[in-house]
Image (cartoon, rainbow, N blue to C red):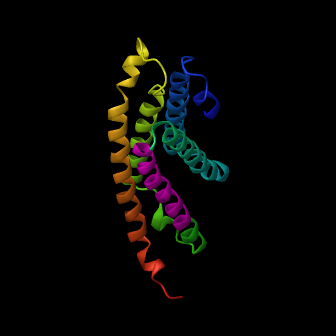
Amino acid sequence: LVGLFYLPDGKGSNIFTGVVFALASVTDWLDGYLARRWDISTSFGAFLDPVADKLMVSTSLILLAGRFGKVVAIPALVILAREIAVSALREWMAQRGERDVVKVGFQGKVKTALTMVALTMLLFVPSPTAATVGGQKFLATLYQPGIILLYLCALVTVTSGSVYFIAAGPSLLDKK
């Protein structure tokens, strides 16, 4: 993803990067869907899937913040802070034997879907220094809706994160 993102302007780096991210997002969803539908999973897969998701999302957020500046950096900070906090909470709850209290819920799934769509849209947007002619001109129009979705994602990120912390509240406040 990083190598494609930094191809020279005019070489279609935004198209390659957007396609790779979109394919990774779809295959991630399909993998999870099939695992649930067929009731098959492995411990390694249960560990690796969320790690791969977080690496893919955090890398994309950092790349896009570098390209578009503070308009992306602000929601990126919110999203990354929530991911770190919820991951730490889940690890702590698992150590206490209470992992199911903070299992992924509906809001978390909505957050993931919004994130994948917003990041895919923004990765398709050409670099501000690239010439926008032909198809690139159309892709440049994805910027505004992508930014709106990214801010919506940041909002859902905060609300879904708060659901996990509220659910873990009794354990967090336990004086043992």
Q: Nearer the viewer, residue 105 or 156?
A: 156
Locate residue 137 relative to residue 90 in the image: left or right. left
Q: Residue furthest front?
A: 129
Residue under the point 61% across and 24% down:
7
Residue 86 within the segment the image draws in magenta:
yes
Prevailing SS of the magenta stretch? helix
Residue occupying the point 39% across, 17% down: 137
Q: Per the image, is 42 magenta?
A: no
Q: Is residue 16 left or right of residue 124?
A: right
Q: Residue lying furthest right in this view? A: 44
Residue 28 x/y as whole percent = 53, 38
Magenta segment: 70-90
Q: Position of residue 134 (x, y in %)?
A: 41, 11
Q: On the rendered image, what quadrant is the N terminus found in? A: top right
Reply above or below: 106 against 130: below
Where residue 59 sits in the image (x, y, percent)? 57, 43
Which residue in the rendered view is the most extreme toward the top?
Answer: 134
x then y, percent, for residue 145: 32, 34
Residue 38 visible in the displayed image:
no
On screen, residue 75 above or below 139? below
